[in-house]
Image (cartoon, rainbow, N blue to C red):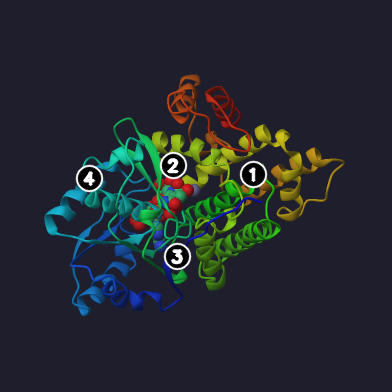
Amino acid sequence: MLDFEYCAPTHVVFGKHAVERIGELVTDQNCKKVLIHYGGGSAKRSGLLDRVTTALEQSQISYILLGGVVPNPRLSLVREGIELCKREGVDFILAVGGGSVIDSSKAIAYGIANDGDVWDFYSKKRVPQACAPVGAVLTIAAAGSEMSNSSVITNEDGWLKRGLNCELCRCKFAIMDPTLTYTLPPYQTASGAADIMMHTMERYFTQVDTLNLTDAIAENLLKSVMRDVTAALNDPEDYDARAGLMWASSLSHNGLTGCGTDGGDWSCHQLEHELGGKYDIAHGAGLCAVWSSWARTVMPTNPSRFAKFAVHVMDVQPGADDTETANLGIDAMERFFESIGMPTRINQMGIDLTEEDMRELAYKCSFMDTRKIGRFLPLDKQAIYTIYQKAKA
Ligand code: NZQ
Ligand code: ZN
């Protein structure tokens, strides 16, 4: 195993009464004015937004509102939010929603704390020096942005979806009430669970020797998510299942399952980000659509790692050798994705990739042929293209 540092500074308030703590948690931030940032309507429809604004009013905290964040959150709204916050003297952003709302909030927070164009940070031209504080009221178990150091934004100019990893943006607090996720459509529940699993699997598939404890946490987290998502799809108001998913969302992406490793592979995320930027698909579904094609491509470099995954996570009976066991594990994961209504090929999301599309995706994913992606087996532009081709249909 490798040496590591671990810091998960977000104050988590978890449970059925978590939202009641909002006034106190925001008051503790000693801010002058809050931007409440939210999405396309679910927080309004559920009454959550009213609960949040009422709590701030009762705590005499002044606030303004900005809604309209869409999945694969857009740079244009981030820029609008930055202008609004500067004009209004906002010094704290409260995200009420899922990964998209939290990521848009983090981007606005970077924008008001640094001079210049915020996209410079996402296009890796500059490194942010500061970030205004952000808090979250989470409404979907998925991206893990409530505890992660990441923010992912889509620039409509070129439809580039780009992530920024930086410790400065970690949420000050995260309010997590599993009952808030009861209203999720099944597809979002499943897509979110898939994303949670991928955050663990991206870290699990590493070539470095791992710590047994880290592997055990990852393997059990994956099994737990598979059990809980199946239960939540059967009964959307299964509190324990929703709670398991929500906590797994955070634990899968706050660094815990990467302790002692090289940080993980992340190829599937890079492959999905190009698809998400161009075709505006649900992130978790996009990950499922490329995962098995990626897995079958890279597995031969280390079949024993995939064989361990097959036995410990997918409960596969070992085959004649590691390669056979590994392939059985990949097959089993595909069947699981199908069982929760997730795609295992890109055409199952209604996208019929042409030769030109695949070349363009590979070109953009390799940052115009200047980088390789992934650590398990680094992939250049041609290898990326081959995976899109395998995953196409
Ligand atoms: O906009 P509303 O109306 O709220 O609808 C949302 C949206 O349509 C809906 N929804 C959320 N909570 C709901 C609900 N509907 C009913 N009831 C509720 N309680 O669900 C849809 C998806 O929401 P979104 O926030 O987009 O989901 P998710 O949390 O999966 O976030 C996806 C974004 O996060 C990025 C993804 O790339 C994608 O852009 N990621 C962010 C990461 C991070 N910051 O650490 C890591 C991830 O790997 C990921 O890349
Ligand atoms: Zn993800």
- Give the image location of residue 25, x and y in percent: 32, 74
Q: Is mark 3 within 8 Å of ligand 1?
A: yes
Q: Is residue 315 visible?
A: yes
The residue that label 3 is drawn on is 181
Q: Which residue is drawn at the image coordinates 53% and 72% (left, top)?
A: 239
Q: Is mark 2 within 8 Å of ligand 1?
A: no
Question: Looking at the picture, which amino acid does disc 1 mark?
Answer: Thr
Label 2 packing within 10 angstroms: few (<14), some (14-19), many (20+): some
Q: Do tag 3 and tag 4 residues touch (Cβ < 8 Å)? A: no
Q: Nearer the viewer, mark 3 or mark 1?
A: 1
Q: Nearer the viewer, mark 4 or mark 2?
A: 4
Q: CA distance from mark 3 to mark 4?
A: 29 Å
Question: Looking at the picture, which amino acid does disc 2 mark?
Answer: Ile
Give the structural element (helix, strand or loop) at label 3: helix
Which numbered dot is residue 79? 4
Q: Closer to the camera, 48 or 211?
A: 211
Which numbered dot is residue 206? 1
The first of marks 3 and 2 along the sequence is 3
The first of marks 1 and 4 along the sequence is 4
Q: Residue furthest front?
A: 3
Q: Nearer the viewer, mark 1 or mark 4?
A: 1
Name the quadrant of the C terminus. top right
Give the structural element (helix, strand or loop) at label 2: loop
Q: Which residue is drawn at the image coordinates 56% and 72% (left, top)?
A: 240
Which numbered dot is residue 15? none
- Give the image location of residue 144, x and y in percent: 47, 57
Q: Is residue 155 left or right of residue 32?
A: right
The residue that label 2 is drawn on is 281
Q: Do tag 4 and tag 2 residues touch (Cβ < 8 Å)? A: no
Give the structural element (helix, strand or loop) at label 4: helix
Q: CA distance from mark 4 to mark 2?
A: 23 Å
The first of marks 3 and 1 along the sequence is 3
